[in-house]
Structure formats: C-alpha cells, structure tokens
C-alpha cells in the first residue's frame, strides 16, 4: 500500500543530493481525502524547508484536510532551522501519515508519537529497506558518528587502474568520467593523496578537498589548490617549506607504523562537519581503507579493455592474501551500462 | 516492419544453441494472408529440419498460401541433409519472405534469387545487426574458416582469478558457476591447459575437451579424463610415459619460442570439425590469446569481493604493457546480474 507514492518520494528526495547534507534526503507526496495526489515536495537544501513543509505550504488547508501524507522519513518533532513538521501536518488536518523509515536521530524523533496523540493514523515500514538505503549516509552519521566513505575506481576489465609505469590516461570514456565527476558532487568532500596529486596533477573540482600528505610533499603549486577549500592531513605541518595558501588548512593526525591513522582521519573530518567522503586515490589508499573495513560503498567504473599484464596496478592493493576466502565481501547494489563502459555500485554487507 | 516477428525468430533460434553446430541458429515465424501468426519453428539440431521446414510442415498448404514467412537467415537453396527450403516456401504458396541476414555460405546462398524468380516479395536486413550477432559463430566459421573463440573468466572485483598462492576456490557463487557450466555446453569444445588440470584437477564435463599439454605433463589419472572425448595438443606425444586412454587422441602442433602456435592449434581444431571453443584456463593462456588477437568473445563473471593484493593472479597476463593506450579493446555486449555476482559479455570490435 502506498508503494507507488513512496517511490515518488524517493525520486523527489534524490533531487536534494549533494545539497542537504548533513540532513537526510526526504521527499513527500500529499493525497486529498479521495486519494488523489494534490501536492508533492522535497528537502531542497540544507537550512531550507523540510519535504513535508515544502509539499504542504503549496496547499490551502481546506484541500489537505482529511488527506494522506506520504514521506520517506518520520516527520520531525523538533525546532531546528525550521519548526516541527509534525505540528504542520496536524495543523493541515491530515488524517493519515505513511512513512518508510523512522528517524534514527533521537533529537528529531517523536514525530510519530505526536501524530498518533493527535488522532492521525500512522503507517510505517513502507519500502523500508529502500528507504534506509536512500538515506544510508544519514543513518551512518547518526548511528556511528562517522562519515560515509565511498571509494571510486576506474579500471580495465582485468582490474587495472594503471600500467606498471603508472600510466593511466585514460581508461574510461568521456561519458563515464563525466558521470564520475557528477557523482563526486553528491558528497561533502573528496579525499585523495599527495601521491595521486604528484603523479597525475588533477584539478578535482570540488568545494571541499582533503589531501593525505603525511610527509608534506606538496608545494601548493599543484592544480588541485586552484579551487575549493583544501584540508591537508599530516602529523606535523612544520615540514612544509612554503606557507599555506589561503584556501588551505591543516588537520593533524597521529601516525602509527609510518601510516596515518585512517580511523582518526575520518573521525576528525566528521567533527569538522564532513558527513560523506568520495575517495579518488590510488591502489594503496583504496587498499588500506578496504583492509581496515572502512569502506561503505565502492563505485567501480570498468572499461571494456584488457591491460593483459599482471604487473599493472590493481584498483585495490592493501594486504598480502594467500587465500581467496580472505577476500573482503560486498553486495552488488547497482549495475549500469554507460556506453562503452559500465559501473557497478557495491555496498557494505 | 516485422521486427516483432523477427525478435521471435531470434528467441526460437536460440533454442538450438549447442545442438545445431556447425549449422547456424535459425528461427522462423509464418503469418497467414491476414497477417495472423499461424506457425513457427526453429532448427532443433544438426541434421534435423531447417527452421522454415519445421514451421511449414506444421501447416496444410491452403492455410499458408498467400502468407508471409519471417526467418532470420536467408532460406537455403541447396541439397544438404535436407532439400532446399526455398523450394518448400514456393510450394506452400508463400507471397512474402522477410529475412534478417543473407547467408554468407556460398554453397547455401541463392535462396533469395530463386524466391524472387518465383514471384515472391523478399525483404532483407530486418534487425540485421542482431541477426548477424546471433549467428556470429557461423559467420566466423564461414568467412574466416576458423573456430569462434570464447574466453570465460571468474574473478574478484579487482580482476583476480586466484591469490598469489594459486588458491582460487571459490570466487563466484554456486549460481554463477552453474550458469557458466550451462554456457560451456553451447560450444563445440572446451579448451584448457595441463597447468590448470594439474593445479585444480577439474572435471569440466563436456563432450569434447581439448588440453594444451606441450610438455606431456599429464598422466591420464586426472579427473578430466573421466568423461567426454579428449584431444591432447602437443608437439610430440612420445614424451608421455603412459599409453593414451581410449577416449583421448593427440593432435601435433609445431612449437615456436617454446610455445605452441595457437593460430595453428585453432586451425587444426577447426579442420577436426570444432566450430567454437570455450576457453577455461588461467591467466597465461587467456593472456596469450588476447595478445595474439584471437579472442572473439569474453564472458567475465565477477564476484563482489576484493582480494586487495596486487600480487594476486589477474584474469589476463600475456604481455608487458607500459601504456594504458596499448590495452586491447572490446565491446560490452551484455551485462547481467546473477545475484550475488554478475557477468559481462564482451565481443571483438
């Protein structure tokens, strides 16, 4: 029941991608008392109206009275940037509220209880798995207080991101690379390493770029400094020979075994307001994230090409493995052709 | 026009997979003079009726008279195992014949000409690319006098078919492995190497198995000898310490640079009546076939697992490559989830 409308909520919610963080993606559909759709809305951007408010404010109260409101996340019950949505739903005389997933945020929860107390029928759990998947970044943030980590790779059919010489331009087609750049904007920050910056000198256009530069190898003349805000991660910025550019800051993270503590890196980035991270780096950082079980999702672009050389560089290289049974398992969540290439989206099991 | 019926021909034709070789896959649909479907058929097995005959013999001639016959390959005009289909079409009073692709076989061609001479309207080129793709094995055989070569791999997301130790069991799931065994039966022979036989001791159930055993390393106690016909490929069978088992024969092929000449191997197999070969081997043979541009198709199964070790064994390893631009390019023809895994089908460009 209400699955069709809930799917529409999901579609609407996705329009907020890259703009609502750290808020969840939420969409809303309103039906009148006859069951006809009379309004819809979504959370457009952080600080803006919630989806329920966006949908209801388009209506006068007579039209909505006795109607049904479908929304993918439990309506909030707290004063944040906007007043509680549950109050507005009551005010509009809605008789039934249909919800996919309950709000995991204790600050915002309580909406269902208030609606019920005011005589509104509440149905929960409609397409619950999909609803939770849609807001997987938000759920991770709230429940684990950590950023959601996505690794992006682009490799040949035989899993190579570069020849043994490091040559890597280009594996995937223009269309796939354009889509990857679009995906990048859905996350609060991108993460790369000084090794990738020095090898490829990429621009990596994004509002927030994080660079692991443990040994302070960068001299800030690299293209990546040309735009966006930069966070440099290292143990001691005194090693930099030049003063930081105005768009760059340093976050200090302790080392262990001559490596940066990735868990601490991610925690500090979360404390700095970064809810989701898109990793665009080489096989070593990718491999280390996988080894430490820190990846929530992998978006792997594959080109229909064979490097045909085992000494080429694999997309993941973080651990010595003698047994296939030690391989790290994920779940294939999406598989899509983007001619001539394709991408697969894998998520944590 | 007639695309819907032609698609049905393709679906019917595929039912003959693995059974009609070296004949093409052909399906046929017959419409009466009002355009209503009255019969359909396909080429079931080698030596059996052609698709047109299969469809027409189900009808009495009054019903078919004035009708349209749709078939994916030009009706034959020669006496082979059965009389010419073009004669039967004329005999049944068909008024219009719709064809996807013309027969590339000079022995069988001439059907269109004869139909036209007998006052039948002939339309060709309906879904021509799909029709040619459907019968790609047949086209290769006729036009190049060589077998169609398909490489099958099963790898992790990072392109590994085994850990550095050789451990490879199992990467893909039961479902994917079952499907791979089903695909295997669509080809005249499977091809593997003594290295794979000695490492994994597979059964590889198939009516015709070919094993590259250049140095006569096998002693015939291996499981692969338990069923099917075996062709052993080497330069000199005198090196075998034991006499051949009754289901095995040897084909001698010259060596060059301490390798078997693959082109000559494939040519000899074609001369021995093998039209298509399904390669199930390791990274070295796969890589050599790719290096020599001998692969027509690759069916690559991928499990949602990361080995995370660059020293693991890649699915293809045949050449030293310093540049990504030297990678061998294919075309992605099919992409399909077979939960929890997926497979991609790539074909020669």
Image (tube, coloured by chain):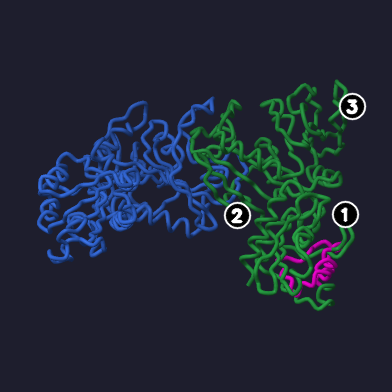
Chain colours: A blue, B green
Q: Secondary structure at mark 1?
A: loop
> The magenta stretch spans which residues?
B85-112
Question: Which residue is under mark 3?
Answer: B238
Question: For residue A160, which quarter of the picture?
Answer: top right
- Which chain is indicated by disc 1? B
Q: Secondary structure at mark 3?
A: helix
Q: Residues within 10 Å of mark 1 (few under 14, many from 20)?
A: few
- Mark closest to the chain's N terminus, 3 or 2: 3
Query: Residue at position x 10%, y 52% from top?
Result: A87
- Is residue A24 or residue A236 the one in the foreground? A24
Res. B243 visible in picture = yes
Question: Which residue is under mark 2?
Answer: B333
Question: Which residue is under mark 1?
Answer: B81
Mark 3 and mark 2 on one chain: yes
Q: Secondary structure at mark 2?
A: strand
- Mark closest to the chain's N terminus, 2 or 1: 1
Residue A101: x %, y % from top left: 26, 44
Q: Is residue A316 above or below residue A87?
A: above
Please identify, in this view, whether the residue under mark 3 or under mark 1 is nearer the observer: 1
Q: Quadrant of the N terminus of chain B?
A: bottom right
- Mark closest to the chain's N terminus, 3 or 1: 1
Residue A298: x %, y % from top left: 42, 43
- Is residue A209 or residue A188 the one in the foreground? A188
């Amino acid at each position: 029941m209400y699955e069709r409308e809930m799917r529409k909520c999901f579609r609407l919610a996705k329009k907020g991608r890259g703009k609502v963080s750290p808020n969840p993606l939420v969409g809303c559909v309103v039906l009148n008392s006859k069951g006809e759709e009379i309004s819809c809305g979504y959370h457009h951007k952080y600080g803006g109206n919630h989806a329920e408010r966006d949908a209801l404010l388009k209506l006068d109260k007579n039209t909505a009275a006795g109607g049904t409101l479908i929304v993918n996340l439990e309506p909030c019950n707290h004063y944040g940037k906007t007043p509680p949505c549950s109050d507005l739903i009551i005010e509009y005389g809605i008789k039934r509220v249909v919800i996919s997933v309950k709000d995991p945020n204790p600050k915002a929860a309580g909406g269902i209880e208030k609606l019920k107390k005011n005589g509104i029928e509440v149905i929960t759990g409609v397409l619950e798995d999909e609803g939770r998947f849609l807001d997987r970044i938000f759920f991770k943030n709230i429940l684990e207080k950590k950023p959601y980590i996505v690794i992006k790779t682009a490799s040949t059919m035989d899993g190579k991101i570069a020849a043994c010489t490091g040559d890597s331009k280009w594996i995937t087609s223009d269309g796939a690379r354009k889509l990857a750049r679009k995906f990048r904007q859905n996350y609060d920050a991108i993460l790369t390493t000084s090794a990738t910056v020095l090898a490829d000198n990429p621009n990596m256009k994004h509002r927030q770029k994080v660079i692991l530069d443990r040994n302070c190898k960068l001299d800030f003349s690299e293209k990546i400094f040309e735009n966006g805000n930069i966070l440099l991660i290292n143990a001691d910025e005194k090693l930099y020979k030049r003063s930081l550019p105005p768009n760059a800051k340093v976050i200090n993270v302790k080392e262990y075994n001559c490596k940066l503590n990735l868990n601490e890196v991610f925690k500090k980035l979360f404390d700095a307001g970064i809810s989701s991270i898109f990793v665009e780096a080489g096989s070593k950082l990718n491999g280390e994230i996988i080894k430490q079980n820190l990846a929530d999702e992998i978006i792997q672009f594959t080109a229909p090409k064979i490097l045909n050389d085992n000494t080429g560089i694999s997309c993941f290289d973080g651990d010595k493995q003698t047994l296939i049974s030690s391989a790290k398992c994920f779940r294939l969540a999406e598989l899509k052709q983007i001619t001539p290439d394709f991408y697969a989206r894998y998520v944590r099991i």
